[in-house]
Image (cartoon, rainbow, N blue to C red):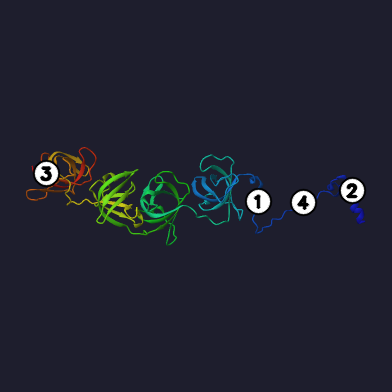
């Protein structure tokens, strides 16, 4: 009986007669879903098999509305030869977790993640190349923290459309500084407690460690986007100070190098547009006010000292320069007559013509007289007010060595001695 059935089946197979015509249609079997601990292979579906792809860490993540852009740095060369590529994804881009197969919101992409990103074959010829991500798989590998890092004290905070923070990058003044853009995507934490901080906690003098994107501008100083900032409330080193007088100055690009004389030796002081310059009353000045014979105090971090040529030259990069305006210093003076008095913002400006009283003084000088200017009568030493000054009065005017380059120059009057009406 069994042999007959086998022979019958072989006959059907030989004649290529469908089995369903003999036995009828087979019953439908309901598939059973089985969950296992093995990785799901469907996340790498066939439709993406031939798509360009890159695997590596992401950085410079920027989110704008429903779009996110990021740079992928490959762990090795891709089959297309790219070591890095900038990709753009939207809220419609498929982003999934490799382990769970669950969708990942594009807003959760952050610097340091390891991903395998599939992208369009349409790639720009820019550096880095750019394309559109078609699918992103977030892997289970540990986040990569190999981002560029800089450490130092914040020397200026400039708030505008974006939030720039300028910090010291290195002790070498010729390597300059770096400008960091701080925004809502920047992670800011306290080093001691690990608590989250805000941009309001970033102030001048605060010591920070900043991780920033691999992309930076070619400007001087370069500009990059801060990814993570670790704040230490206290600076690592207190600022030292040095009293000195300027021997000479010369320009270096958009900076000034002042050759100064201290009690022990001569020093080069590297001053940039980011160096804070004030006088001892707190008034702000610029690099152009640092001229020969001006007495200054420089405040600097001990890490910002560079020794050149076997200790023969020392370069100091100060964080702050204070111009010493000593009222008793009468080294610059002019004896003459007031030709004109003009009202200015903080007092009056006297136009004086006469003869200089010192080698570095001026025959003709315009001096700004304020409430801080000492005015006395030569005859008895009594004090006078600015309202006592009139055109035609003879006087001796002593003023700051900080003068404008105008003709006649303008300076701030420190002391006025009225000789005769």
Residue 395 — which label? Answer: 3
Mark with earlier residue (3, 1): 1
Q: Nearer the viewer, mark 3 or mark 1?
A: 3
Q: Are marks 3 and 1 in contact (CB under 8 Å)?
A: no
Residue 178 in sight = yes
Query: Where is residue 27 drawn, in percent x and y?
Result: 79, 51
- 10 Å neighbourhood of mark 1: few (<14), some, or many (≥20)? few
- 10 Å neighbourhood of mark 4: few (<14), some, or many (≥20)? few
Q: Are marks 4 and 3 in contact (CB under 8 Å)?
A: no
Residue 286 in sight = no
**Frontmost residue, 42 versus 117:** 117
Mark with earlier residue (3, 2): 2
Residue on which disc 1 sits: 42
**Frontmost residue, 57 versus 16:** 57
Residue at horizontal 91 percent and vertical 56 percent from the top = 2
Residue on which disc 2 sits: 11
Mark with earlier residue (4, 3): 4
How far apart are labels 4 and 2 at the CA level? 27 Å
Residue on which disc 4 sits: 28
């Amino acid at each position: 009986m069994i042999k007959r059935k086998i022979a019958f089946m072989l006959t059907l197979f030989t004649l290529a007669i469908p089995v369903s015509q003999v036995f009828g249609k087979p019953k439908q079997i309901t598939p059973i879903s089985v969950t296992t601990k093995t990785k799901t292979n469907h996340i790498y579906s066939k439709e993406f098999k031939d798509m360009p792809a890159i695997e590596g860490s992401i950085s410079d993540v920027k989110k704008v509305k429903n779009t996110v852009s990021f740079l992928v740095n490959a762990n090795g060369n891709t089959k297309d030869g790219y070591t890095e590529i900038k990709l753009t994804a939207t809220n419609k881009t498929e982003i999934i977790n490799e382990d769970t197969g669950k969708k990942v919101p594009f807003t959760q992409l952050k610097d340091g993640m390891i991903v395998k990103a599939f992208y369009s074959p349409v790639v720009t010829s820019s550096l880095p190349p750019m394309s559109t991500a078609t699918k992103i798989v977030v892997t289970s590998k540990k986040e990569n923290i190999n981002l560029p890092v800089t450490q130092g004290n914040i020397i200026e905070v400039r708030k505008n459309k974006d939030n720039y923070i300028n910090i010291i990058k290195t002790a070498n003044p010729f390597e300059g500084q770096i400008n960091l853009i701080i925004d809502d995507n920047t992670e800011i934490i306290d080093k001691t407690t690990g608590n989250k901080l805000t941009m309001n906690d970033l102030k001048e003098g605060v010591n920070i460690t900043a991780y920033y994107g691999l992309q930076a501008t070619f400007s001087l100083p370069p500009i990059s986007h801060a990814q993570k900032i670790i704040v230490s409330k206290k600076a690592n080193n207190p600022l030292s100070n040095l009293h000195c007088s300027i021997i000479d100055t010369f320009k270096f690009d958009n900076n000034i190098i002042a050759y100064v004389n201290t009690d022990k030796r001569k020093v080069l002081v590297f001053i940039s547009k980011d160096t804070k310059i004030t006088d001892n009353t707190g008034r702000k000045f610029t690099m152009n006010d640092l001229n020969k014979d001006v007495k200054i105090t420089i405040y600097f971090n001990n890490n910002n000292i560079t020794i050149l040529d076997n200790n023969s030259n020392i370069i100091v990069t100060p964080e702050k320069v204070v111009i010493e305006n000593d009222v008793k210093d009468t080294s610059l003076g002019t004896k003459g007559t007031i030709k004109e008095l003009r009202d200015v913002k903080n007092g009056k400006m006297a136009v004086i013509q006469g003869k200089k009283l010192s080698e570095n003084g001026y025959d003709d000088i315009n001096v700004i007289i304020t409430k801080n200017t000492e005015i006395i009568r030569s005859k008895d030493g009594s004090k006078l007010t600015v309202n006592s000054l009139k055109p035609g009065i003879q006087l001796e005017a002593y003023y700051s060595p900080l003068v404008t380059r105008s003709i006649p120059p303008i300076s701030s009057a420190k002391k006025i001695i009225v000789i005769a009406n």
